[in-house]
Image: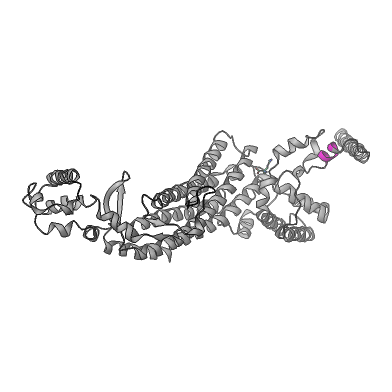
C-alpha cells in the first residue's frame, strides 16, 4: 500500500516537474510545440508532440464545425442529465450550462475561433468552455466519450436536414403537378429506345417524375426511423460506470429511442449510408429528368424552352442559350454516387468499434446534402419557369408512326389475332415509308389491300388525340386517367 502511494506520489511529482520544465521552455521560447502538446485535452500520457502538419492531417475541425449547434445541444442534454443523476453538483452544472449557452450565442454570430490544434468540434468546444468558465468545464466530459458524442451530433444533424430535404422534394412535386395540370391535353410523343413509341399526354410524362419523387420522399421519411435514435451514453464503446440516464438525454434531445448496444451505437454509420443511398437514387431521378430537359430544349426537339433566368450564354457564340443548370445537376450526380461508394468503402474494413476512419463519414455527407438541396431548388425553379411548346409537340405527334399500335389494336378489336394485326400494320408502315407518307395519308383502298377489316372509321382511330383518349386502363395516359392520377397526387401532398 505504502509503496504504491509513494510510487504514485513520485509520478505526480515528476509530472509537475515536467510541466514546470515545459512552461519554462515555453516561456523561453525553446519548445513551444512541446508545450502545445502538453496542453492538449488528451495530452497527459504524451512526451512528445506531433508536428503541426500531422495535427492538420488528423483534424476534422475544418469541416465538422458545421456540427457546432448539435454538439452544444448534445452537451447541454448530457450535463443536465449529469446534474439530475447527482453525478455532478448542481452548481457545476449551472456553470457549464451558462458557458455552453454563451458559446452557442457566439456560434450563432459566427464568432467562435476554431483551432486546428484542438482537432475537432468536440475538443474545440470543450477547450473554449474551459477557457471561459475555468477547470469546472472539464467536468462536462464525465461519463461521455467523443465516440458517442460525435455519433449523437451526426444523428441530430441528419434528423434536421432530412426534414429539409423532404420539404424541398415536396415543393418540387407541387411545381411538377401544377405544370402537369396545365398540360393534360397537350399531346406529345412518348418514347422507348429513344424512338417514337406512342402518343401521350404531356402531363403523364411529367407526372412520372412526381411519382419517382414520391418514392424518394418516402425513403427519406422512412430513414428517419433509423436516424432518430440516441447513441449518447454509449461512452467510448462499453458504456460507463457513472449512473447515467440515457432515456433522459434521448428525451431531452428529442430522440424516439436509444441504441440497445453501446458498441453498435458508436460504430453504426448505416444511417449515413442510407442517407447517401437515398440521395444517390434521388439524383438518378433528377439526372434523368435533367437529361430530358436538355434534349427537349435542343433545336432538334424544341419541346420546351427554359427561362432565361435558368439558362446561360456562350462566351463566343452569341446565339447560344445553354441548359447549364440541368447539365450541372446531371453532372453533380457523379459526386453523390461517389460519396456513397466512398463511405461504404470506408466502413467495410473497420473492426468494431470506433476507428478514426469514421471521421471520413462527414465531408461526403455534407457535400451530398448541399448538392441535393441545391439541385432540388434549382430544378423546381427551372420547371416552374419553363415554357412548354404545345404547338411543336402537337406537330411532332402528327408526323410520325406513333399511332401504329392504334391500327393494330383496331384490327384486334375486329377479331384479328393481335399477332396478325401487328404484321398487317407493319406492312402498312413499310408501304408508307416507301412512299414517304404516314398511316393517316393512306387511302382506304391501300389499307384494304392488307386487310378487308379496315373501314372508314380507321381515320378517327389514327388521330393522336384519340390514341391518348382511349388509353383508359388504370395508370394509362388517357386524359381521364391522367386527371384521376393528378387527384391522387394531390392527396399525397396534403
Ligand atoms: N473527430 C472525430 C470523428 O469525427 C470524433 C471522434 C473522435 N474519437 C476518437 N476516439 N478519436 O470521428
Residue sitting at x 16%, y 52%: 407
Quarter occupied by the C terminus: bottom left
**Residue 119 image offset from top left, x and y in percent:** 73, 43
**Residue drawn 79% across the image and 39% down it:** 43
The x and y percentages for residue 315 are: 54, 48
Horizontally, residue 248 falls left or right of residue 341, namely right
13 in magenta: no
Query: How many marks do you count on the picture?
Result: 0
Q: In which quadrant of the rendered image does the N terminus lie?
A: top right
Q: Pick the residue in front: 40 or 338.
A: 338
Q: Which of 181 and 78 is in front in this view?
A: 181
Q: Residue furthest left?
A: 452
**Residue 34 is one of the magenta-drawn residues:** yes
Magenta stretch, main secondary structure class: helix
* Quarter residue 86 falls in: bottom right
Magenta-drawn segment: 33-38
Where residue 248 sits, quadrant-wise, is bottom right
Tell which of 485 and 151 is nearer to you: 485
Q: In which quarter of the image is ligand 1?
A: top right
Residue 130 pos. (x, y %): 80, 52
Q: Classify residue 206 as left or right of residue 436.
A: right
Q: Can residue 143 be seen at all in this image of the molecule?
A: no
| Residue 106 visible in the snapshot | yes
Measured as percent of width and height from the top left, residue 417 is found at: 11, 47
Amino acid at each position: 500500500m505504502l509503496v504504491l502511494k509513494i510510487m504514485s506520489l513520485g509520478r505526480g511529482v515528476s509530472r509537475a516537474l515536467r510541466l514546470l520544465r515545459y512552461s519554462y521552455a515555453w516561456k523561453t521560447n525553446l519548445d513551444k510545440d512541446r508545450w502545445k502538446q502538453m496542453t492538449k485535452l488528451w495530452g497527459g500520457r504524451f512526451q512528445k508532440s506531433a508536428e503541426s502538419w500531422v495535427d492538420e492531417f488528423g483534424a476534422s475541425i475544418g469541416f465538422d464545425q458545421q456540427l457546432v449547434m448539435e454538439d452544444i445541444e448534445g452537451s447541454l442534454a448530457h450535463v443536465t442529465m449529469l446534474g439530475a443523476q447527482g453525478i455532478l453538483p448542481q452548481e457545476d452544472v449551472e456553470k457549464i450550462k451558462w458557458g455552453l449557452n454563451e458559446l452557442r450565442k457566439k456560434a450563432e454570430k459566427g464568432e467562435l475561433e476554431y483551432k486546428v490544434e484542438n482537432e475537432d468540434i468536440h475538443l474545440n468546444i470543450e477547450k473554449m468552455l474551459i477557457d471561459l468558465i475555468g477547470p469546472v468545464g472539464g467536468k462536462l466530459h464525465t461519463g461521455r466519450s467523443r465516440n458517442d458524442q460525435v455519433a449523437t451530433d451526426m444523428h441530430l444533424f441528419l434528423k434536421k436536414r432530412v426534414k429539409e430535404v423532404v420539404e424541398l422534394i415536396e415543393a418540387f412535386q407541387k411545381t411538377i403537378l401544377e405544370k402537369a395540370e396545365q398540360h393534360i391535353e397537350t399531346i406529345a410523343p412518348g418514347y422507348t429506345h429513344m424512338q417514337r413509341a406512342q402518343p401521350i399526354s404531356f402531363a403523364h410524362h411529367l407526372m412520372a417524375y412526381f411519382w419517382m419523387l414520391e418514392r424518394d420522399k418516402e425513403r427519406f421519411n422512412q430513414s428517419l426511423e433509423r436516424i432518430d435514435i440516441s447513441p449518447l451514453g454509449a461512452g467510448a464503446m462499453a458504456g460507463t460506470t457513472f449512473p447515467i440516464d440515457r432515456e433522459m438525454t434521448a428525451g431531452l434531445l428529442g430522440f424516439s429511442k436509444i441504441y440497445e448496444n453501446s458498441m453498435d451505437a458508436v460504430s453504426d454509420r448505416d444511417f449515413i449510408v442510407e442517407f447517401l443511398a437515398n440521395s444517390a437514387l434521388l439524383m438518378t431521378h433528377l439526372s434523368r429528368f435533367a437529361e430530358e430537359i436538355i434534349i427537349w430544349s435542343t433545336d432538334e426537339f424544341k419541346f420546351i424552352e427554359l427561362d432565361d433566368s435558368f439558362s446561360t450564354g456562350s462566351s463566343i457564340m452569341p446565339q447560344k442559350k445553354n441548359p447549364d443548370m440541368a447539365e450541372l445537376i446531371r453532372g453533380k450526380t457523379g459526386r453523390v454516387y461517389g460519396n456513397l461508394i466512398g463511405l461504404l468503402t470506408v466502413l467495410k474494413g473497420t473492426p468494431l468499434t470506433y476507428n478514426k476512419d469514421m471521421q471520413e463519414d462527414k465531408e461526403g455527407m455534407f457535400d451530398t446534402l448541399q448538392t441535393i438541396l441545391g439541385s432540388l431548388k434549382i430544378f423546381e425553379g427551372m420547371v416552374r419557369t419553363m415554357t412548354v411548346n404545345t404547338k411543336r409537340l402537337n406537330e411532332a405527334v402528327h408526323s410520325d408512326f406513333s399511332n401504329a399500335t392504334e391500327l393494330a389494336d383496331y384490327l384486334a378489336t375486329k377479331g384479328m389475332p393481335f399477332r396478325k394485326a401487328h404484321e398487317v400494320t407493319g406492312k402498312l408502315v413499310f408501304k408508307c415509308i416507301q412512299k414517304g407518307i404516314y398511316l393517316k395519308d393512306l387511302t382506304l383502298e391501300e389499307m384494304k389491300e392488307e386487310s378487308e377489316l379496315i373501314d372508314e372509321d380507321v381515320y378517327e382511330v389514327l388521330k393522336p388525340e384519340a390514341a391518348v383518349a382511349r388509353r383508359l386502363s388504370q395508370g394509362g395516359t388517357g386524359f381521364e386517367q391522367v386527371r384521376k392520377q393528378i387527384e391522387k397526387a394531390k392527396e399525397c401532398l396534403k
